[in-house]
Each structure stands twice: as C-alpha cells, then as structure tokens.
Image (tube, rainbow, N blue to C red):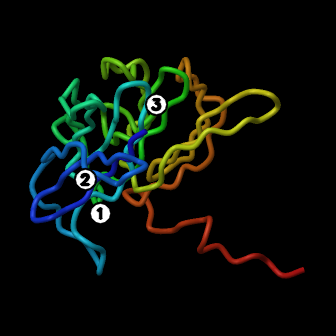
Amino acid sequence: GKAITMFEDGDQYIVAFDAMSGEELWRRRIGESFPGRDGSWNGPISTPVIHGGLVVALEPYGRLFALDTTDGRPVWSVDFAAEPGALRPAYGFGSSPLVVDDTLVVHGGGQQGTVLGLDVASGEIRWAVGTEPVLAPSPAILKLAGRRMVVASGQEHVFGVDPASGEIKALVGGYDFNRSQFNRAVQSLRQSG
C-alpha cells in the first residue's frame, strides 16, 4: 500500500511513500508556498483522500486535483479560487475531501457552491448547495434514522445533504457577519428563571 500526504518545503508538494518501507515512490510540486497565519505553519492543511487508483487533494490556494496513485500523474483539476464570487478563507482552503461511493464531497465556497459533490473519476460537478464562504472544517458522513447524510458547514449554515443527489435533508443556522455582528449561538444571554 501507499501513504500519501502533502507538505511544504519552500513550495507545496504531494508525496507518496511505500506504507511498509517508507521509501518515497513519487513527489509532485503542487504550487508555491502558502503563508501560515496566526502562528500556523506554512503550507497545505487538508488531508488527501485515496479512492481506487486516484488521490484527491485540495491545496490552500483553492485548487482541487486528482492524481494517479501509481506515478502522481495529473488526472483532473478544478480551481475554486478562479470561480466568480469565490472567497479564499484566511487560512486557505483547508477542508479535507470525502468520498462517499463515487461522489467526492468538498467545500468550495462562493457562487459555485458552499458544498459540492463531484464525480470522483472525472471531477465533474454533480451537485452544489449554498453560496456562502467556507471555513476549514471537513465534511463528514453520518447515519441518521437509517439514512446516510453528509454533514458540512459554511460560514452561515450547517448542511445535511444526501451524498448521491445533493438534496438538502437538514439545514441549521442563518448567521451572516455581513448582515449582523451579533452571533446568537455564542453571544446570547440566557434569561434567569
């Protein structure tokens, strides 16, 4: 098997190792240095996901890409930061992609969708929900009442989404810093009594 991760050494890289021996199998430069914020290290902060013969990763400047796990050859890429209305989070795009069956779920942010479902083999967008900026949390899968649901958050909402169709099954939130600086979830005071 292989262990694949991303790191920074002047530039950003993705690298594959033999899981048993630790021998480096291949390395690919994925971009220029991304500066850390507030004491964090420079470089990527998301974790790649391996599915079939592909590794899919999101680098902090907003490029989502798939490489062949055999040799690191590029298969497809999508640049979220290049999309109209996209806003790069302060710490960079840092959510780790999630694969559910053959759907890749990832945070995009902005007009192209807060949470997107893509065909993992081709990178084609299947569905998108929301239009708000994203932060760093990664999507997760959970089972509720016997049904699988992807839970993912934007800057304003937490979405519960059917991973195959993108249908919103649950929606919590409504907080928007652009409309009000008051956050009901953490700033409200409970009445005594």
For label 1, the residue is 91
Identified at 39% across, 42% down, the residue is 2
Labels 2 & 1 near each other (Cβ < 8 A)? yes
| Closer to the eye: label 3 or 1 | 1
Position in image of residue 190 (x %, y %): 75, 76
Which numbered dot is residue 109? Answer: none
Q: Is residue 149 left or right of residue 2?
A: right
Q: Is residue 122 left or right of residue 75?
A: right
Position in image of residue 7 (x %, y %): 25, 59
Camera-side residue: 15 or 44?
15
Between marks 2 and 1, how big is the CA–CA gap? 8 Å
Identified at 54% across, 28% down, the residue is 100
Determine whether the residue tagged by mark 3 lies in a helix, strand or loop: strand
Q: Amino acid at mark 3?
A: Val
- Tell which residue pokes out farthest to the front in this image: 21
Camera-side residue: 154 or 123?
123
Q: Say which quarter of the image contains residue 11.
A: bottom left
Q: Amino acid at mark 1?
A: Tyr
Position in image of residue 154 (x %, y %): 46, 48
Which numbered dot is residue 129? Answer: 3
Which numbered dot is residue 60? Answer: 2
Camera-side residue: 138 or 44?
44
Camera-side residue: 160 or 61?
61
Q: Earlier in the sequence, mark 2 or mark 1?
A: 2
Position in image of residue 59 (x %, y %): 25, 48
Q: Earlier in the sequence, mark 2 or mark 3?
A: 2
Q: Amino acid at mark 2?
A: Pro
Q: Total of numbered circles in the picture? A: 3
Position of residue 84 relative to residue 167, above or below, is below
Q: Residues within 10 Å of mark 2 (few under 14, many from 20)?
A: many
For the N terminus, the image quarter is top left
